[in-house]
Image (tube, rainbow, N blue to C red):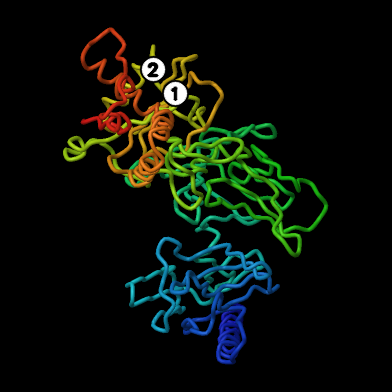
Amino acid sequence: MDRLINSLTRLRATQLLFLTWVLTCIPGTTSESLLQGFKATPNPSVSSFQPLLNDPTGNFSLGFLRVEQTQLALAVLHVASSQPLWLANPTQLATWSDRTQFFFNGSLVISDPHSSLFWSTQTNGDTVVLLNSSNLQVQKLDNPVTVLWQSFDFPTNTLVENQNFTANMSLISSNGLYSMRLGYNFYALYAKFQDNSADHMYWKHTALEAQAAIVQGQGPIHALVNSDGYLGLYQNSTAKPVDIQPFSSFHRPIDLFLLVRLEPDGNLKAYYWDGSNWVEDYKAISDTCQLPSPCGSYGLCTPQGCSCLDNRTEFRSDSDCVPVESGDFCGEQLVKDNYEVLTRNGVEVPFKELMQYETTSSLVECEDLCENNCSCWGAVYNNASGFCFMLDYPIQTLVSVGDESKVGYFKVREGAGKKKNKAVAVVGLVVGGGAILVLIGIGGFWTYRIWRKKTRENDDDEVSPGPYKNLGSESSKAIEVEMCNR
Protein backbone atom coordinates (compact mmCIF):
# COMPACT_ATOMS: atom_id res chain seq x y z
CA MET A 1 0.00 0.00 0.00
CA ASP A 2 2.82 2.44 0.91
CA ARG A 3 4.51 1.77 -2.46
CA LEU A 4 1.22 2.46 -4.25
CA ILE A 5 0.75 5.73 -2.35
CA ASN A 6 4.31 6.79 -3.15
CA SER A 7 3.79 5.96 -6.84
CA LEU A 8 0.57 7.99 -6.94
CA THR A 9 2.29 10.89 -5.20
CA ARG A 10 5.12 10.89 -7.78
CA LEU A 11 2.55 10.67 -10.59
CA ARG A 12 0.69 13.66 -9.21
CA ALA A 13 3.91 15.65 -9.01
CA THR A 14 4.72 14.76 -12.63
CA GLN A 15 1.26 15.83 -13.77
CA LEU A 16 1.52 19.11 -11.87
CA LEU A 17 4.94 19.75 -13.37
CA PHE A 18 3.61 19.18 -16.88
CA LEU A 19 0.61 21.44 -16.22
CA THR A 20 2.84 24.19 -14.86
CA TRP A 21 5.13 23.93 -17.91
CA VAL A 22 2.17 24.20 -20.28
CA LEU A 23 0.63 27.19 -18.51
CA THR A 24 3.86 29.14 -18.09
CA CYS A 25 5.05 28.51 -21.65
CA ILE A 26 1.84 29.60 -23.37
CA PRO A 27 1.57 33.43 -23.57
CA GLY A 28 -1.37 34.97 -21.71
CA THR A 29 -1.96 32.00 -19.37
CA THR A 30 -1.63 31.91 -15.59
CA SER A 31 -0.92 28.82 -13.53
CA GLU A 32 -2.88 27.52 -10.55
CA SER A 33 0.28 25.95 -9.04
CA LEU A 34 4.04 26.33 -9.36
CA LEU A 35 6.59 23.52 -9.25
CA GLN A 36 10.35 23.53 -8.89
CA GLY A 37 11.97 25.06 -11.93
CA PHE A 38 9.41 27.86 -12.33
CA LYS A 39 10.97 31.22 -13.21
CA ALA A 40 9.53 34.61 -14.19
CA THR A 41 10.79 38.13 -14.89
CA PRO A 42 8.85 41.42 -15.08
CA ASN A 43 7.30 42.26 -18.44
CA PRO A 44 8.33 45.82 -19.40
CA SER A 45 5.01 46.37 -21.21
CA VAL A 46 2.94 45.75 -18.03
CA SER A 47 1.90 49.00 -16.36
CA SER A 48 0.29 47.76 -13.13
CA PHE A 49 0.06 44.04 -12.33
CA GLN A 50 1.52 40.94 -13.96
CA PRO A 51 -0.30 37.79 -12.73
CA LEU A 52 1.68 34.59 -12.20
CA LEU A 53 -0.54 32.34 -10.09
CA ASN A 54 -4.32 32.27 -9.54
CA ASP A 55 -6.49 30.65 -6.89
CA PRO A 56 -9.08 28.09 -8.10
CA THR A 57 -11.92 30.64 -8.04
CA GLY A 58 -10.07 33.38 -9.91
CA ASN A 59 -10.79 35.85 -7.09
CA PHE A 60 -7.13 36.18 -6.05
CA SER A 61 -3.85 36.34 -7.91
CA LEU A 62 -0.14 36.30 -7.09
CA GLY A 63 2.07 38.40 -9.30
CA PHE A 64 4.32 41.39 -9.87
CA LEU A 65 2.79 44.66 -8.66
CA ARG A 66 4.33 47.76 -10.20
CA VAL A 67 5.00 50.49 -7.63
CA GLU A 68 5.77 54.07 -8.71
CA GLN A 69 6.78 52.89 -12.20
CA THR A 70 10.27 51.64 -11.30
CA GLN A 71 9.74 49.33 -8.31
CA LEU A 72 8.26 45.87 -7.96
CA ALA A 73 6.43 44.05 -5.17
CA LEU A 74 5.49 40.39 -5.15
CA ALA A 75 1.85 40.66 -4.11
CA VAL A 76 -1.40 38.76 -3.66
CA LEU A 77 -4.28 40.84 -5.05
CA HIS A 78 -8.03 40.75 -4.85
CA VAL A 79 -8.58 40.60 -8.62
CA ALA A 80 -11.89 42.44 -8.95
CA SER A 81 -10.68 45.49 -7.02
CA SER A 82 -6.90 45.24 -7.61
CA GLN A 83 -6.55 45.61 -3.85
CA PRO A 84 -3.25 44.21 -2.47
CA LEU A 85 -3.83 41.79 0.40
CA TRP A 86 -0.25 40.69 1.02
CA LEU A 87 3.27 41.78 -0.01
CA ALA A 88 6.36 39.59 0.17
CA ASN A 89 8.82 42.21 1.38
CA PRO A 90 7.06 45.56 1.91
CA THR A 91 10.04 47.33 3.52
CA GLN A 92 12.37 46.77 0.56
CA LEU A 93 11.00 46.64 -2.98
CA ALA A 94 12.74 45.14 -5.99
CA THR A 95 13.39 46.91 -9.30
CA TRP A 96 11.02 46.51 -12.26
CA SER A 97 13.67 45.15 -14.61
CA ASP A 98 14.29 42.07 -16.71
CA ARG A 99 17.28 41.40 -14.44
CA THR A 100 14.93 40.88 -11.49
CA GLN A 101 13.91 37.25 -11.16
CA PHE A 102 11.22 35.39 -9.26
CA PHE A 103 11.65 31.63 -9.13
CA PHE A 104 10.76 28.50 -7.18
CA ASN A 105 13.52 26.02 -6.41
CA GLY A 106 11.90 24.57 -3.31
CA SER A 107 11.88 28.10 -1.93
CA LEU A 108 10.09 31.12 -3.33
CA VAL A 109 12.87 33.56 -4.20
CA ILE A 110 13.12 37.17 -5.42
CA SER A 111 16.54 38.16 -6.71
CA ASP A 112 17.35 41.73 -7.76
CA PRO A 113 21.01 42.37 -8.71
CA HIS A 114 20.38 46.13 -8.95
CA SER A 115 19.66 46.50 -5.23
CA SER A 116 21.27 43.22 -4.07
CA LEU A 117 17.85 42.27 -2.78
CA PHE A 118 17.34 38.68 -1.88
CA TRP A 119 14.08 37.43 -0.36
CA SER A 120 13.31 33.77 0.21
CA THR A 121 10.87 31.54 2.07
CA GLN A 122 13.84 29.27 2.93
CA THR A 123 11.91 26.07 2.36
CA ASN A 124 12.35 22.80 0.49
CA GLY A 125 8.89 22.36 -0.98
CA ASP A 126 7.45 20.63 -4.04
CA THR A 127 4.72 23.05 -5.08
CA VAL A 128 3.26 26.52 -4.53
CA VAL A 129 -0.50 27.07 -4.44
CA LEU A 130 -2.81 30.01 -3.86
CA LEU A 131 -5.88 28.94 -1.90
CA ASN A 132 -9.37 30.38 -2.36
CA SER A 133 -8.86 32.21 0.95
CA SER A 134 -5.98 34.23 -0.63
CA ASN A 135 -3.44 32.24 1.43
CA LEU A 136 -0.23 31.52 -0.51
CA GLN A 137 1.39 28.24 0.54
CA VAL A 138 4.60 26.31 -0.13
CA GLN A 139 3.69 22.63 0.21
CA LYS A 140 5.51 19.31 0.49
CA LEU A 141 3.67 16.59 -1.41
CA ASP A 142 3.76 14.06 1.38
CA ASN A 143 0.84 12.00 2.54
CA PRO A 144 -0.80 14.06 3.89
CA VAL A 145 0.41 17.27 2.26
CA THR A 146 2.60 19.36 4.57
CA VAL A 147 2.47 23.16 4.61
CA LEU A 148 6.04 24.42 4.96
CA TRP A 149 5.30 28.14 4.67
CA GLN A 150 2.22 30.33 4.19
CA SER A 151 1.58 34.01 3.67
CA PHE A 152 -1.10 34.02 6.40
CA ASP A 153 1.76 33.71 8.93
CA PHE A 154 3.37 36.92 7.63
CA PRO A 155 0.63 39.56 7.27
CA THR A 156 1.51 43.05 6.08
CA ASN A 157 -1.21 45.68 6.66
CA THR A 158 -4.26 43.43 6.07
CA LEU A 159 -6.06 40.51 7.69
CA VAL A 160 -8.68 38.65 5.65
CA GLU A 161 -11.51 36.53 6.99
CA ASN A 162 -10.52 33.30 8.76
CA GLN A 163 -6.89 34.42 8.99
CA ASN A 164 -5.34 33.96 12.44
CA PHE A 165 -3.44 36.86 13.96
CA THR A 166 -1.13 35.71 16.77
CA ALA A 167 0.99 37.33 19.45
CA ASN A 168 4.19 37.01 17.39
CA MET A 169 2.68 38.87 14.41
CA SER A 170 2.08 42.54 13.73
CA LEU A 171 0.18 44.57 11.17
CA ILE A 172 2.23 47.44 9.74
CA SER A 173 0.63 50.33 7.86
CA SER A 174 1.83 50.84 4.29
CA ASN A 175 3.83 53.93 5.31
CA GLY A 176 5.52 52.02 8.14
CA LEU A 177 4.43 54.48 10.83
CA TYR A 178 1.76 52.48 12.64
CA SER A 179 1.36 48.92 13.88
CA MET A 180 -1.15 46.62 15.55
CA ARG A 181 -0.09 44.02 18.10
CA LEU A 182 -1.63 41.69 20.67
CA GLY A 183 -1.06 41.83 24.41
CA TYR A 184 -2.03 39.49 27.22
CA ASN A 185 -5.74 40.41 27.10
CA PHE A 186 -5.92 43.17 24.51
CA TYR A 187 -4.93 44.35 21.08
CA ALA A 188 -3.59 47.85 20.52
CA LEU A 189 -2.37 50.32 17.92
CA TYR A 190 1.09 51.90 18.14
CA ALA A 191 2.83 54.83 16.46
CA LYS A 192 6.52 55.16 15.63
CA PHE A 193 7.05 58.91 15.88
CA GLN A 194 10.80 58.60 15.40
CA ASP A 195 13.39 55.91 14.74
CA ASN A 196 15.35 54.27 17.54
CA SER A 197 12.66 54.99 20.12
CA ALA A 198 9.83 53.05 21.70
CA ASP A 199 6.49 52.91 19.92
CA HIS A 200 3.65 54.86 21.53
CA MET A 201 0.27 53.23 22.13
CA TYR A 202 -2.58 55.42 20.88
CA TRP A 203 -5.55 53.03 20.95
CA LYS A 204 -6.35 49.92 22.98
CA HIS A 205 -9.18 47.38 23.11
CA THR A 206 -9.33 45.04 26.12
CA ALA A 207 -11.15 41.72 25.94
CA LEU A 208 -14.53 41.80 27.68
CA GLU A 209 -14.36 38.06 28.47
CA ALA A 210 -18.16 37.82 28.40
CA GLN A 211 -18.45 34.35 26.83
CA ALA A 212 -15.14 32.88 27.96
CA ALA A 213 -12.40 33.96 30.35
CA ILE A 214 -8.68 34.18 29.64
CA VAL A 215 -6.94 31.58 31.78
CA GLN A 216 -3.40 32.42 32.85
CA GLY A 217 -0.92 29.79 31.72
CA GLN A 218 -3.17 28.45 28.98
CA GLY A 219 -1.33 30.20 26.17
CA PRO A 220 -1.58 33.59 24.47
CA ILE A 221 -4.68 34.94 22.77
CA HIS A 222 -5.07 35.23 19.01
CA ALA A 223 -7.42 37.25 16.82
CA LEU A 224 -9.46 36.13 13.84
CA VAL A 225 -11.64 37.99 11.33
CA ASN A 226 -14.83 35.95 11.46
CA SER A 227 -16.94 35.63 8.32
CA ASP A 228 -20.00 36.34 10.48
CA GLY A 229 -18.93 39.98 10.69
CA TYR A 230 -16.68 40.50 13.71
CA LEU A 231 -13.09 40.47 14.93
CA GLY A 232 -12.84 37.82 17.63
CA LEU A 233 -10.24 37.13 20.30
CA TYR A 234 -9.63 33.51 21.29
CA GLN A 235 -7.37 31.55 23.61
CA ASN A 236 -5.97 28.25 22.38
CA SER A 237 -8.56 26.41 20.30
CA THR A 238 -11.57 27.23 22.44
CA ALA A 239 -14.81 27.45 20.51
CA LYS A 240 -15.98 30.51 22.43
CA PRO A 241 -14.28 33.86 21.92
CA VAL A 242 -13.05 35.86 24.89
CA ASP A 243 -14.05 39.00 23.02
CA ILE A 244 -16.12 40.05 20.00
CA GLN A 245 -15.74 43.35 18.19
CA PRO A 246 -18.82 43.44 15.93
CA PHE A 247 -18.84 45.11 12.53
CA SER A 248 -21.86 46.71 10.88
CA SER A 249 -22.33 43.42 8.96
CA PHE A 250 -22.48 41.38 12.19
CA HIS A 251 -24.93 38.45 11.79
CA ARG A 252 -26.14 39.71 8.42
CA PRO A 253 -27.24 36.71 6.28
CA ILE A 254 -25.22 37.65 3.18
CA ASP A 255 -22.12 36.18 1.61
CA LEU A 256 -19.38 38.78 2.03
CA PHE A 257 -15.59 38.79 1.74
CA LEU A 258 -14.25 40.64 4.79
CA LEU A 259 -10.92 42.18 5.57
CA VAL A 260 -9.37 44.36 8.28
CA ARG A 261 -6.69 46.86 7.30
CA LEU A 262 -4.41 49.22 9.22
CA GLU A 263 -4.65 52.45 7.24
CA PRO A 264 -1.86 54.98 6.52
CA ASP A 265 -3.51 57.46 8.92
CA GLY A 266 -3.25 54.91 11.76
CA ASN A 267 -6.91 53.90 11.90
CA LEU A 268 -7.95 50.24 11.96
CA LYS A 269 -10.86 49.64 9.57
CA ALA A 270 -12.90 46.70 8.34
CA TYR A 271 -14.42 46.43 4.85
CA TYR A 272 -16.55 44.00 2.89
CA TRP A 273 -16.70 43.54 -0.87
CA ASP A 274 -20.25 44.05 -2.18
CA GLY A 275 -19.43 42.90 -5.70
CA SER A 276 -18.34 46.27 -7.04
CA ASN A 277 -16.96 48.32 -4.11
CA TRP A 278 -15.29 48.00 -0.73
CA VAL A 279 -17.82 49.12 1.89
CA GLU A 280 -16.54 50.38 5.25
CA ASP A 281 -17.82 48.03 7.95
CA TYR A 282 -16.00 49.23 11.06
CA LYS A 283 -13.42 51.75 12.25
CA ALA A 284 -11.64 51.70 15.59
CA ILE A 285 -11.22 55.49 15.94
CA SER A 286 -14.31 57.50 15.00
CA ASP A 287 -12.95 60.92 16.01
CA THR A 288 -10.38 62.11 13.47
CA CYS A 289 -8.66 64.30 16.07
CA GLN A 290 -7.84 61.18 18.14
CA LEU A 291 -5.72 59.74 15.33
CA PRO A 292 -1.94 59.94 15.89
CA SER A 293 -1.21 62.86 13.57
CA PRO A 294 -4.12 63.86 11.32
CA CYS A 295 -2.81 67.40 10.80
CA GLY A 296 0.89 66.54 10.68
CA SER A 297 3.83 67.91 12.64
CA TYR A 298 2.93 70.86 14.93
CA GLY A 299 -0.65 70.73 13.64
CA LEU A 300 -3.86 71.54 15.47
CA CYS A 301 -7.00 69.47 14.94
CA THR A 302 -10.47 70.99 15.31
CA PRO A 303 -13.93 69.64 14.43
CA GLN A 304 -13.83 71.98 11.44
CA GLY A 305 -10.47 70.75 10.14
CA CYS A 306 -6.76 71.41 10.55
CA SER A 307 -4.67 74.46 11.35
CA CYS A 308 -1.19 75.07 12.75
CA LEU A 309 -0.17 75.50 16.39
CA ASP A 310 1.62 78.64 15.28
CA ASN A 311 -1.40 80.47 13.90
CA ARG A 312 0.83 82.72 11.82
CA THR A 313 1.53 79.74 9.58
CA GLU A 314 -1.06 78.73 7.02
CA PHE A 315 -1.99 75.05 7.11
CA ARG A 316 -1.41 73.12 3.89
CA SER A 317 -2.60 69.58 3.42
CA ASP A 318 0.45 68.66 1.35
CA SER A 319 3.05 69.68 3.95
CA ASP A 320 3.63 69.91 7.70
CA CYS A 321 3.28 73.13 9.69
CA VAL A 322 6.88 72.60 10.81
CA PRO A 323 9.22 70.20 8.99
CA VAL A 324 9.30 66.76 10.59
CA GLU A 325 12.14 66.46 13.10
CA SER A 326 13.79 63.54 14.88
CA GLY A 327 16.18 62.86 17.74
CA ASP A 328 16.23 64.90 20.96
CA PHE A 329 18.08 67.80 22.57
CA CYS A 330 20.56 65.67 24.52
CA GLY A 331 23.57 65.62 22.17
CA GLU A 332 26.47 67.92 22.98
CA GLN A 333 26.04 69.83 19.73
CA LEU A 334 22.26 70.06 20.10
CA VAL A 335 22.59 71.55 23.59
CA LYS A 336 24.65 74.40 22.14
CA ASP A 337 22.19 74.93 19.32
CA ASN A 338 19.24 77.28 19.70
CA TYR A 339 15.58 76.36 19.74
CA GLU A 340 12.45 78.42 19.86
CA VAL A 341 9.60 77.99 22.32
CA LEU A 342 6.00 78.02 21.16
CA THR A 343 3.12 78.17 23.64
CA ARG A 344 -0.56 77.80 22.88
CA ASN A 345 -3.69 77.96 25.03
CA GLY A 346 -6.75 75.77 24.50
CA VAL A 347 -4.95 72.57 23.46
CA GLU A 348 -4.67 69.04 24.80
CA VAL A 349 -2.97 65.82 23.79
CA PRO A 350 -4.95 63.21 21.85
CA PHE A 351 -5.54 59.75 23.35
CA LYS A 352 -4.62 61.26 26.74
CA GLU A 353 -6.01 58.22 28.59
CA LEU A 354 -2.97 56.29 27.30
CA MET A 355 -0.40 59.05 27.92
CA GLN A 356 1.91 59.21 30.93
CA TYR A 357 1.84 62.36 33.02
CA GLU A 358 3.28 64.06 36.08
CA THR A 359 1.20 65.97 38.61
CA THR A 360 2.48 69.52 39.10
CA SER A 361 1.26 72.50 41.11
CA SER A 362 1.48 75.05 38.32
CA LEU A 363 2.01 75.66 34.61
CA VAL A 364 5.48 77.05 35.33
CA GLU A 365 6.50 73.83 37.11
CA CYS A 366 5.20 71.73 34.20
CA GLU A 367 7.12 73.81 31.67
CA ASP A 368 10.27 73.63 33.78
CA LEU A 369 10.08 69.84 33.79
CA CYS A 370 10.20 69.86 30.00
CA GLU A 371 12.69 72.70 29.72
CA ASN A 372 15.19 70.84 31.91
CA ASN A 373 14.67 67.49 30.19
CA CYS A 374 16.66 67.17 26.98
CA SER A 375 14.43 64.28 25.83
CA CYS A 376 11.29 66.38 26.11
CA TRP A 377 9.88 68.03 23.01
CA GLY A 378 6.88 69.59 24.69
CA ALA A 379 4.42 69.50 27.56
CA VAL A 380 0.69 70.08 27.90
CA TYR A 381 -0.69 71.28 31.24
CA ASN A 382 -4.22 70.90 32.58
CA ASN A 383 -4.78 73.58 35.20
CA ALA A 384 -7.89 71.87 36.62
CA SER A 385 -6.24 68.51 37.35
CA GLY A 386 -2.59 69.53 37.57
CA PHE A 387 -1.69 66.87 35.01
CA CYS A 388 1.46 67.62 33.03
CA PHE A 389 1.70 65.47 29.90
CA MET A 390 5.31 65.20 28.75
CA LEU A 391 5.96 64.55 25.05
CA ASP A 392 9.23 62.66 24.52
CA TYR A 393 8.92 62.62 20.74
CA PRO A 394 8.82 65.29 17.98
CA ILE A 395 5.56 67.22 18.24
CA GLN A 396 2.67 65.78 16.26
CA THR A 397 -0.94 66.99 16.08
CA LEU A 398 -2.59 68.51 19.17
CA VAL A 399 -6.33 68.76 19.78
CA SER A 400 -8.08 72.13 20.03
CA VAL A 401 -10.37 72.52 23.06
CA GLY A 402 -12.46 75.39 24.43
CA ASP A 403 -10.74 75.35 27.83
CA GLU A 404 -8.06 78.07 27.75
CA SER A 405 -6.55 76.74 31.01
CA LYS A 406 -5.12 73.81 29.06
CA VAL A 407 -1.78 75.12 27.82
CA GLY A 408 0.86 73.63 25.56
CA TYR A 409 4.61 74.33 25.67
CA PHE A 410 6.54 73.18 22.59
CA LYS A 411 10.18 73.26 21.53
CA VAL A 412 10.89 74.11 17.89
CA ARG A 413 14.34 73.57 16.43
CA GLU A 414 16.10 76.71 15.21
CA GLY A 415 15.25 77.39 11.59
CA ALA A 416 12.29 75.00 11.48
CA GLY A 417 9.50 76.80 9.64
CA LYS A 418 11.57 80.01 9.49
CA LYS A 419 10.95 80.43 5.76
CA LYS A 420 7.18 80.57 6.28
CA ASN A 421 7.48 83.02 9.21
CA LYS A 422 9.82 85.26 7.24
CA ALA A 423 7.23 85.53 4.49
CA VAL A 424 4.74 86.86 7.03
CA ALA A 425 7.24 89.49 8.20
CA VAL A 426 7.80 90.66 4.62
CA VAL A 427 4.08 91.22 4.18
CA GLY A 428 4.13 93.41 7.30
CA LEU A 429 6.94 95.56 5.92
CA VAL A 430 5.23 96.04 2.58
CA VAL A 431 1.83 96.95 3.98
CA GLY A 432 3.14 99.34 6.62
CA GLY A 433 3.02 100.13 10.32
CA GLY A 434 -0.57 99.00 10.78
CA ALA A 435 0.30 95.54 9.54
CA ILE A 436 3.17 95.32 12.01
CA LEU A 437 0.75 95.82 14.89
CA VAL A 438 -1.41 93.00 13.53
CA LEU A 439 1.61 90.74 13.23
CA ILE A 440 2.60 91.42 16.82
CA GLY A 441 -0.91 90.61 17.99
CA ILE A 442 -0.90 87.32 16.11
CA GLY A 443 2.48 86.35 17.51
CA GLY A 444 1.64 87.27 21.09
CA PHE A 445 1.96 83.78 22.47
CA TRP A 446 5.55 83.65 21.18
CA THR A 447 6.68 87.00 22.69
CA TYR A 448 4.93 86.20 25.98
CA ARG A 449 7.40 83.38 26.52
CA ILE A 450 10.30 85.78 25.94
CA TRP A 451 9.48 88.36 28.60
CA ARG A 452 8.36 85.84 31.20
CA LYS A 453 11.54 83.81 30.73
CA LYS A 454 13.59 86.96 31.33
CA THR A 455 11.63 87.75 34.49
CA ARG A 456 12.26 84.25 35.86
CA GLU A 457 15.98 84.34 35.05
CA ASN A 458 16.39 87.74 36.75
CA ASP A 459 14.53 86.48 39.85
CA ASP A 460 12.31 89.55 39.59
CA ASP A 461 8.92 89.37 41.31
CA GLU A 462 7.56 92.27 39.31
CA VAL A 463 5.90 91.63 35.98
CA SER A 464 7.94 92.83 33.03
CA PRO A 465 6.19 95.36 30.78
CA GLY A 466 6.98 93.11 27.81
CA PRO A 467 8.24 93.99 24.33
CA TYR A 468 5.29 96.23 23.41
CA LYS A 469 6.29 99.19 25.59
CA ASN A 470 8.06 101.16 22.83
CA LEU A 471 7.30 100.74 19.15
CA GLY A 472 9.81 103.18 17.77
CA SER A 473 12.85 102.46 15.62
CA GLU A 474 13.46 99.27 17.60
CA SER A 475 9.94 97.93 17.00
CA SER A 476 11.15 95.35 14.47
CA LYS A 477 13.06 93.62 17.27
CA ALA A 478 9.82 93.14 19.19
CA ILE A 479 8.36 90.96 16.47
CA GLU A 480 11.39 88.70 16.21
CA VAL A 481 11.19 85.42 18.12
CA GLU A 482 13.95 85.37 20.71
CA MET A 483 16.03 82.19 20.79
CA CYS A 484 16.38 80.34 24.06
CA ASN A 485 19.95 79.12 24.34
CA ARG A 486 20.19 75.72 25.98
Residue 26 in the figure: left or right of residue 37:
right
- For the question of whether residue 390 can be seen, the reply is no
Q: Is residue 155 left or right of residue 112?
A: right
Instruction: Tell me: 396 left or right of 271.
Output: left
User: Which mark is first along the chain, 1 or 2?
Assistant: 2
Residue 461 appears in which quarter of the rendering?
top left
* Vertical comparison of 176 with 244: above or below: below
Residue 98 is situated, as x and y percent measured from the top left of the image, at 42, 84
Q: Quadrant of residue 142?
A: bottom right
For the residues bearing labels 2 and 1, Cβ distance under 8 angstroms: yes
**Nearest to the observer: residue 154 or residue 472:** 472
Q: Residue at x 55, y 35 (%)?
A: 185
Q: Which residue is mark 1?
A: 407
Judged left or right of residue 467, residue 81 is right
Other-residue count near label 1 (Cα within 10 Å), few / some / many at <14 / 14–19 / ≥20 = many
Residue 447 or residue 17, whichever sits in front:
447
Res 363 label: 2
Q: Residue at x 28, y 20 (%)?
A: 453
Residue type indicated by callout 1: Val
Q: At which x and y percent is residue 83?
A: 61, 64
**Which residue type carries mark 2?**
Leu
**In this view, 259 is above or below 148:** above
